Image (cartoon, grey):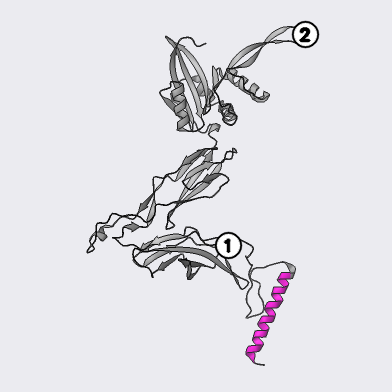
Amino acid sequence: MSNKVKKRIVLCSAMVTITTLLLCTGIVKENVKAEENTTIITEQTTNKALTVPSYFKGMSSKKGIVLSWKKNNEADGYIIYKNGRKLKTIKSSKTKYADKKVKTNKAYTYEIQSYKNAGGKKTLSTKSLKIKVVKTNANSRKQNVTGFENIKKEYKLGIGESSRLKPTVEITKKSKKSKKVKNTKKVKQKAYSKKIRWSSSNLSLVKVDKNGRITAASDKTTGTAYIYVMAHNGVQKKIKISVVNYALLGSVKNIKKVDDNAIKKMITDNKTDTAKIAEYFQYNNPGESIELKYGRRGINTDDGGYTYEDCIKMSDEIELNKEMYDFILKYIMSNNIKSIKIEKNYVVFQNTHLYSYGYKVNDLVYVFNGKEALDNYQYNNAVYDVIPVSDRWYYGTSYAYGSIF
């Protein structure tokens, strides 16, 4: 028997012994050393999902179409596909590839996936979303998208709120050098495609539809999610969405512009109590206009007598649990305010002061749904000017003639 055959037998024997041991014990160790010249066995990752390379995009260049992506530390390399066929296998150390076999003004579809070698097998991730990249020059009418306009890096949403994002795509403009090229035509350029794809990092917190409408969860959950805007060629923009409970009265501002001491106290010393009432009616809204005031009512005593007790007078009866009823009553009395008004889109903590020809109404208002609710408040209460004192909280004043009562 030749030395070459003997060596093969030794190698195979060593491999079988180590593999059998690992399978029987259920223990997989990294860098397990066998006899000299045998293969080193490392931990297999076939049971774990291998992720797709992120930020996969393509742009046109003098070399052709340059594809790029973010390094995947889990992978041993990447496989690129062009128009549905395998184009190139690349080692993990690289994050760029230039496809030179392209024609000007023609678009090509690309995909990428990660791979990992383990146990003599190649594990593959799923393929990325398809991107479409066009090879362009200075005179190409259709250009690849280079970015997005009319969209900010960060937005805030109240719990359960929706808002539509309306970004527009941005394309590469002609450089000064391109104008010097002979036979350059004055072509009106536009994006190869204006279509935008949307995705969310946390669908349980913030959802996004195909039209860019983002919606926060309505189960009182707060936190941060990221919305990704993606163009035809994979160019992306990451947008931070913070879901906020505005009722909790965050940092207070413009306090010097509030000329009502009772309202100042409500947003400083008693801000936690104020927020508790605002939050309660945001999620337990009667759906109609209700006014709560301090009152007195007569009651029969156990010994057959009659007396009076403090109570909440309601313009229309609504159901309040005893704990919240007692809390609101104490709040109205301790803050010395005229009333609490509950509307469909806002809550008003109201105070009044006499002046020469009538009375001045001072409001602390919390609006549930941003500008629309604020407009409703101002219109319904004849308030021409408001001062923001916190996010979604405002101080408004108005004047009226006649009696306070």
Answer with left or right where residue 199 lies relative to residue 8.
left
Q: Is 240 situated above or below 63?
A: above
For residue 17: magenta? yes
**Which portion, as a residue range, is magenta?**
1-23
**Residue at 71% in and 70% down:** 22
Task: Give the mark nearer the N terminus: 2 vs 1.
Answer: 1
Main SS, magenta residues: helix
Q: Residue furthest bottom?
A: 1
Residue 175 pos. (x, y %): 28, 57
State if disc 1 and disc 2 touch (CB < 8 Å).
no
One can see residue 57 in this view:
no
Residue 30 x, y percent position in the rendering: 64, 68
Snapshot quadrant of residue 34: bottom right
State whether residue 51 is above or below residue 281: below
Q: Which mark is residue 385?
A: none
- Give the residue at mark 1: 50
Residue 321 percent location from the top left of the image: 67, 25
Tell me the element at label 1: loop
Residue 397, picture quadrant: top left
Residue at the extreme right: 303
- Depicted 189 relative to depicted 388: above or below: below
Picture quadrant where residue 360 is located: top left
Q: On the image, numbered disc 2 is attached to which residue?
A: 303
